Amino acid sequence: MGAFDMLRIANSSLGMHQTWLDALANNIANANTVTATNQDAFQEQMVVATALPEGGVEVSGIEAGDPNGIMEYAPDHPLADANGYVKTPAMDMSVQMTSLVQAQRGFQASVQVTKTAQDTYAAALQIGQR
């Protein structure tokens, strides 16, 4: 492992966690999105990450959730069909919130690794100047 691999690996983790946080924020913001029954429901975004052989991680894709959503009876809603139904996203908010905590903790850990690596490299440079 090279001298700056720690920074490269931490940076790849920061990027993946930022993408995951963005996807989760979008999911949570659209948790109450209602669509007509003849349209696709909001589809949650699920980040797919792949470990790299040289260390680190990359976002290899973003998968979409179920377009069928959940049929809810809401006869007073302006988008309700003739039977009084609308579609809502097929997402579990407890899963979204748990994932949000995981993504935040991963991001914070990557930031700490980056800070520690920078401090270590700065200290090594100071040793060489004495």
Image (cartoon, rainbow, N blue to C red):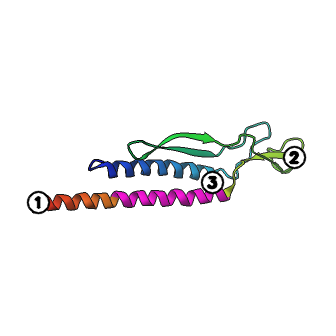
Can you name the residue that lies furthest to the top here? 38
Answer with mark 3 or mark 2, whichever residue precedes in sequence. Answer: 3
Identity, as a three-letter code, of the amino acid under mark 3: Ile
Q: Residues within 10 Å of mark 2 (few under 14, many from 20)?
A: some
Look at the numbered discs 1 and 2 and tell me whether their residues touch, using CB distance below 8 Å.
no
Q: Secondary structure at mark 2?
A: loop
User: What residue is drawn where x is 26% and y is 60%?
Assistant: 120
Look at the numbered discs 3 and 2 and tell me whether their residues touch, using CB distance below 8 Å.
no
Look at the numbered discs 1 and 3 and tell me whether their residues touch, using CB distance below 8 Å.
no
User: Mark 1 to mark 2: distance in Å?
Assistant: 76 Å
Query: Residue at label 2?
Result: 84
Residue 56: % across, % down:
41, 47
Task: Read off the magenta span.
Answer: 94-114
User: What residue is drawn where x is 69% and y is 54%?
Assistant: 92
Q: Is residue 32 left or right of residue 117?
A: right
Mark 1 or mark 2: which is in front? Answer: 1
Mark 1 or mark 3: which is in front? Answer: 1
Mark 3 or mark 2: which is in front? Answer: 3
Query: Residue at label 1?
Result: 129
Query: Residue at label 3?
Result: 28
